[in-house]
Amino acid sequence: MNEKSKGIQSLAREAALLPQEEVLQITAKTSELVIGIPKEESLQEKRVALVPEAVALLVARGHQVLIETGAGAQAHYSDADYSESGARIVYDRRQAFQTSIVIKIEPPTMVEVELMGLRQTLISALQWTVQPTGLLAALAAKKITAIAWDFIQNENGIYPLVRAMGEIAGNSAVLIAGDLLAGPHGRGTLFGGVSGVPPTEVVIIGAGTVGEFAARAAVGLGATVKLFDDSPNRLIRLQNALGQRLWTSTLQPSVLSEALRTADVAIGAIRGTGQRTPMVVSEPMVAGMRKGTVVIDVTIDRGGCFESSRITSHERPTFIEMDVIHYCVPNIPSRVSRTASKALSNIMAPLLLEFAADGGVEDSIKQNRLARSGVYMFNGNLTHAGLATESKLPFKDLGLLLATL
């Protein structure tokens, strides 16, 4: 081997010992999101869609968040909290509605739709039964893509945001009942009772999420729980979830009436399958309840399941009818606005990050089943058959619309 070959081999060995550059896989660039959070103006609404911690996460990933001044005040978050998290505080309400994605808790009003531009994405609750006439047509005219957070459903068939609010409502119902039961118009009793004193009797109508968490809280405080539902399967599921046997019954009027006569607290948590909650407790049943008994009608936002119920507010939450205390606030989670905001934000922020990772809202709706499940309008086309029928607007299948993109 000549000197030249030896020199080449020496250089090759030295090169092999030098630090090597790592070859990384090039990933698709994520889409930058511009998110607007307007202040909620509904009288009953105190929640905010994203808390400062979620805003900080989004900003750290390269996204922009514009929040209207005072939007988090009722959830006990200041403008400074959001500013320090990287959000831009805007003082002109229109600016919060001019972003590519607008996130609200309550459905938009007609005035708020007017503030929006063309081809934006709106994420909010839908609550179709209380919407003004012409709202869907107004959104369609602006080619809006609308996602209802109360429609979002995961692969297990669970509505995560609705369930989170149901958990809060169930727990809160029991705490509210305890305050009212011991208050000046109540029976002067401690919720749950103590040794040597008979426990509080609680009747819960409905074995869904609200009923489950109301039962958990009531049992945890030592109360006796009687649970009613029109589905034996739900009753069995709830007993298994609680890990203990409860007094349960299907919805038979005579049995329910007898249980209400001795109850200290009655919680209405049944939803039904229609637009309106089934009214399962008649006025004569309420009249048969003892003086100072507490009724918490969680279903009042859909008409209520007690015939004697009527809507109240957080400012004036109760009224007395037939000597029975009624609490009929339609938005119980707003009573604990900070907790409720965190629960919503914990689900909303990851969804927004998925939008970005998928390349934008339209691409994410194509690829992401979770995002697609909440869509009821796509680029101004109504994609929910039930809403189209009720609003008398044309319906287009979302799958066909996505196939044309």
Image: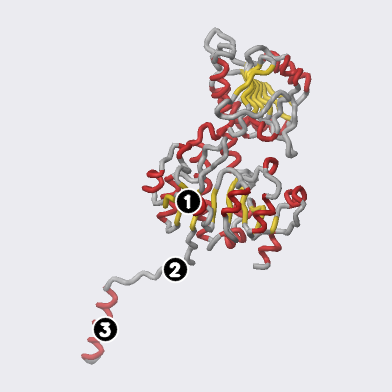
Circle 2 is placed at which residue position?
25
Comes first in the chain, label 2 or label 1: 2
Can residue 127 be seen? yes
Q: Residue at x 38, y 44 (%)?
A: 80
What quarter of the picture does the C terminus occupy?
A: bottom right
Give the total of numbered labels: 3
Q: Nearer the viewer, residue 21 or 60?
A: 60
Q: Which of marks 2 and 1 is in front?
A: 1
Q: Residue at x 76, y 22 (%)?
A: 282
Which residue type carries mark 1? Asp
Crowd class of label 2 (few under 14; some 14 to 19; many from 20; radius 10 Å): few
Comes first in the chain, label 3 or label 1: 3
What quarter of the picture does the N terminus occupy?
A: bottom left
x and y percentages locating residue 150 in the rendered image: 62, 44
Which residue type carries mark 2? Gln
x and y percentages locating residue 113 in the rendered image: 60, 52
Which residue type carries mark 3? Gln
Asked which quadrant contains residue 186, the reply is: top right
Image height of 361 relative to 265, above or below: below
Circle 1 is placed at which residue position?
92
Q: In the drawing, does residue 324 fall left or right of residue 14?
A: right
Asked which quadrant contains residue 117, the reply is: bottom right
Element type at marker 1? loop
Q: Which mark is residue 9?
A: 3
Q: Residue 117 carries which label?
A: none
Can residue 207 be seen? no
